[in-house]
């Protein structure tokens, strides 16, 4: 990536050179000069014109060359991009999967922006408390959010949320930034409550006090990232939704983030399948496993460690007496179809009978 | 697992940088054309003046005036170029900003960092705006770009011209689209577009519909014959319309008279326009969403008793409906989610089976027991057990 930026900077340099030293000015200057020469000495008009003809040609040639050079460097650059960004996203599309579902998709998008408090983009649906707090956060007013977070401290801690801490931290940093030293010191007490959980960072926060007035040039400048307030806003809506039983993240956001991570694999798979003249989107199940991060696993999936098949209602997970779980069909194979036959668990030395195994529900 | 594969994800960003670079390039080409044409003319002019002056048919004062005229023309050219140069700067700067954005991405370490979440949110807004623009919602797209401060990451103005052409086609007028074809002639040839022919066909069809046969024949002579080498079959089909009235039920004339052909023209124009400007033929939102929904989709998503409020596919009103025709995800490995806490069960938070076979996480059960005198209630069956009766489950 860095190389691509460097290469483009070279192009930009050429462009700037062409701009600051406009070649047309050079042309205008030589024509004007010829004109003045002729006015000063009309008898030498022919010589002046001959000189003009020559230099006009040579200057216009350089102009043309400079312009062409810039253009060809852009063309070259554009071609180089094709080598870096090679994935053909469209390989993985099923153009008909969303047919006649445009309204649903639009609704999903609208809901996504509504929960972010961006009403103008979505539709005004319901104006709940959450949106007032978000509006205040947008104005850098942390008060209502802090009040809410403090009231819900226990529930938030249960979800191991750091929202309250982050809000206090932000308030404190606001005071430091606006050089209200005494207020900042007084406010530090609020942060003390989180001292054990965020020890290192609390130390850094206090360290800021040494640099009041030139904080942006201090070793603590990173605490004042311009995006911090966006992050807090996002964190607040996530926790708020979670507490009132809405999905924590916007479903559109989750789907697209998972989709972005899955795309490279999907493209590869779709390309392979196309070569075999089948469409991935026509299958009832994906032929590959897409790894999900823990926060995007929403359902228990049990894949039998013996057969590698996913459990179904007909082939449910069974726990043997030792606590190991395998699918019913694998169990039947291990005991050779005889429920009273003793067999060894494939994962530990313990022996048991199929009749002792128990259906489990995840 | 939480590591980012930068190269793979970056490889998806082709249109993001290609679009502004190509606009930059085409602006350069336009200024180049202007320069070459005008300077070529002026070079000729100077040699003409020179010749006349040598022959004596032009006085030095006249020469002076003629040179003054040349200076004026150069100044006009300079003004004209200024506007194009402004475009060049706009698009080169836009490219630079986008490259920087991708560079920022390359420094993000893990999938669970704040930076990655922030980058994902920007990417979401980018592809939603792209979707809105294609869908004809330029207003909300502009609003969103502005409120998220990502004007440089989206190409709203590129849709202004194409909107005009599409509106004209909706009014059943080909003129604007034909003009567009003329302006982009060489590029359309490169992608082997047949848009112009389709438009010519349509104009002919409209003449035939009104039974203006003489005019239709004249039109065909002028505008259809140039295509005879490649499109003879289509030409003979439309010519056949002269013999059939618009009410005909006869194939293929009925289909040719069908007004829905205008919609096909719009679709054809769109796909050509996207190809020329290096937009993807289908919205990135659709393909990304399909990949995401398929990865998340499980049979449980459509069973009310297994519904999880956090799972996008579980909402039958929105994304669940969109995911309906997509394949289910596939798993070789187990991942067990606690139905009480939503947490993943693993070595740190073991799965525990109640005597009735229902499995929950260790953390959730011990917490429940600590509040209820050592008793736990199975939330799915209502059965009550002692914590001492639960059993460790081993998932390999």
Image (spheres, coloured by chain):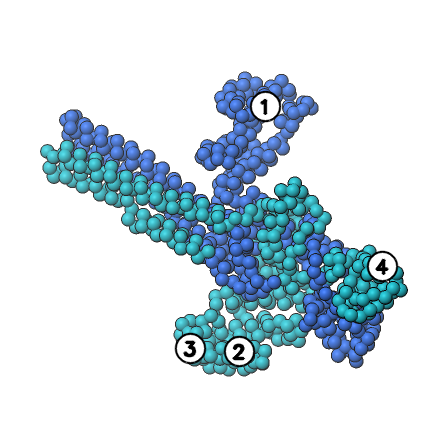
Q: Which mark is residue A336?
A: 4
Do discs 1 and 3 share a chain? no
Question: Which SS class for mark 4?
Answer: loop
Foreground: A44 or B163? A44
Gap between marks 4 and 2 measured at Cα: 59 Å
Q: Secondary structure at mark 1?
A: helix
* Chain letter matching colour blue: B
Q: Note whether B264 is above or below B23 in the view shown.
A: above
Chain letter of mark 1 equals B
Check disc 4: other Cα within 10 Å, few if <14, some if 14-19, many if 20+: few
Foreground mark, 1 or 3? 1
Residue at left 60%, top 49%?
A268
Q: Which of B290/B30 is in front?
A: B290
Q: Considering only order in the chain, which callout, 2 or 4, is on the residue closer to the N terminus?
A: 2
Q: Earlier in the sequence, mark 4 or mark 3?
A: 3
Q: Nearer the viewer, residue B41 or B326?
A: B326
| Front of the two marks 4 and 2 | 4
- Foreground disc of the pair 4, 3: 4
Q: Is residue B72 visible?
A: yes
Residue to which mark 1 is pinned: B233
Q: CA distance from mark 2 to mark 3?
A: 18 Å
Q: Earlier in the sequence, mark 2 or mark 3?
A: 2
Q: Can see residue B286?
A: no
The location of residue B354, given as percent across then percent down, is: 80, 71
- Which color is chain A depicted in? cyan
Q: Disc 2 sits on a residue from what chain?
A: A
Return the x and y of residue A276 as percentages of the image width and height: 65, 42
Discs 2, 1: same chain: no
Identify the residue position indicated by label 2 in the image: A200
């Amino acid at each position: 990536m860095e190389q691509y930026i460097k290469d483009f900077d070279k192009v930009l340099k050429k462009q700037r050179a062409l701009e600051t030293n406009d070649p047309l000015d050079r042309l205008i200057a030589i024509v004007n000069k010829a004109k003045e020469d002729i006015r000063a000495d009309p008898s030498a008009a022919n010589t002046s014109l001959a000189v003009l003809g020559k230099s006009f040609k040579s200057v216009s040639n350089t102009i043309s060359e400079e312009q062409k050079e810039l253009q060809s460097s852009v063309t070259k650059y554009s071609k180089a991009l094709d080598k870096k960004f090679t994935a053909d996203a469209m390989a993985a599309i099923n153009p008909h999967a969303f047919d006649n579902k445009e309204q649903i998709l639009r609704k999903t998008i609208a809901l996504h922006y509504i929960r972010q408090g961006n009403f103008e983009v979505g539709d005004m649906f319901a104006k709940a408390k959450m949106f007032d707090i978000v509006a205040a956060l947008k104005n850098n007013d942390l008060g209502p959010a802090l009040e809410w977070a403090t009231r819900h401290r226990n529930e938030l801690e249960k979800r191991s949320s750091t929202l309250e801490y982050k809000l206090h931290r932000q308030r404190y940093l606001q005071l430091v930034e606006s050089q209200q030293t005494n207020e900042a010191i007084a406010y530090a007490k609020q942060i003390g409550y989180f001292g054990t959980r965020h020890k290192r960072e609390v130390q850094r926060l206090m360290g800021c006090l040494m640099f009041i007035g030139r904080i942006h040039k201090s070793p603590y400048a990173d605490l004042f990232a311009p995006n911090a307030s966006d992050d807090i806003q996002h964190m607040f809506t996530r926790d708020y939704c979670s507490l009132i039983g809405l999905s924590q993240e916007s479903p559109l956001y989750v789907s697209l983030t998972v989709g972005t991570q899955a795309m490279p694999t999907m493209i590869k798979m779709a390309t392979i399948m196309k070569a075999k003249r089948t469409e991935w989107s026509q299958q009832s199940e994906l032929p590959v496993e897409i790894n999900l991060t823990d926060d995007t696993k929403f359902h228990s999936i049990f894949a039998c460690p013996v057969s590698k098949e996913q459990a179904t209602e007909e082939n449910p997970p069974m726990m043997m007496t030792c606590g190991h779980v395998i699918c019913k069909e694998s169990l039947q194979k291990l005991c050779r179809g005889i429920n009273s036959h003793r067999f060894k668990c494939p994962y530990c030395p313990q022996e048991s009978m199929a009749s002792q195994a128990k259906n489990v529900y995840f | 697992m939480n590591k980012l594969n930068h190269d793979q994800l970056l490889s998806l960003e082709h249109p993001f940088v290609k679009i502004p670079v190509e606009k930059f390039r085409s602006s350069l080409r336009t200024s180049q054309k202007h320069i070459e044409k005008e300077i070529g003319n002026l070079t000729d002019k100077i040699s003409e003046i020179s010749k006349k002056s040598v022959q004596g048919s032009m006085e030095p004062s006249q020469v002076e005036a003629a040179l003054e005229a040349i200076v004026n023309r150069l100044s006009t050219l300079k003004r004209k170029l200024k506007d194009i140069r402004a475009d060049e700067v706009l698009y080169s700067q836009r490219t630079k900003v986008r490259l920087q954005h991708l560079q920022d991405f390359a420094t993000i370490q893990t999938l669970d960092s704040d930076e990655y979440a922030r980058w994902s949110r920007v990417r979401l807004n980018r592809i939603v705006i792209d979707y809105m623009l294609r869908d004809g919602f330029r207003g909300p797209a502009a609003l969103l770009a502005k409120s998220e401060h990502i004007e440089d990451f989206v190409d709203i103005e590129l849709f202004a011209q194409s909107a005009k052409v599409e509106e004209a086609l909706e009014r059943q007028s080909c003129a604007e689209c034909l003009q567009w074809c003329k302006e982009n002639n060489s590029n359309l040839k490169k992608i082997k577009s047949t848009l112009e022919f389709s438009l010519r066909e349509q104009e002919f069809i409209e003449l035939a519909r009104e039974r203006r046969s003489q005019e239709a024949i004249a039109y065909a002579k002028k505008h259809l014959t140039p295509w005879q080498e490649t499109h003879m079959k289509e030409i003979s089909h439309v010519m056949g319309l002269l013999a059939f009235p618009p009410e005909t039920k006869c194939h293929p004339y009925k289909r040719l008279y069908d007004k829905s052909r205008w919609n096909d023209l719009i679709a054809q124009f769109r796909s050509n326009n996207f190809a020329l400007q290096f937009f993807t033929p289908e919205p990135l939102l659709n393909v990304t969403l399909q990949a995401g929904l398929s990865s998340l989709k499980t049979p449980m998503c459509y069973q009310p008793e297994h519904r999880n409020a956090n799972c996008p596919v579980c909402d039958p009103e929105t994304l669940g409906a969109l995911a309906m025709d997509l394949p289910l995800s596939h798993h070789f490995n187990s991942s067990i989610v606690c139905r009480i806490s939503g947490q993943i069960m693993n070595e740190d938070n073991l799965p525990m089976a109640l005597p009735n076979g229902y499995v929950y996480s260790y953390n959730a059960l011990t917490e429940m027991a600590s509040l209820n005198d050592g008793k736990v209630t199975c939330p799915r069956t209502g059965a009550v057990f002692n914590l001492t009766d639960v059993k460790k489950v081993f998932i390999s």
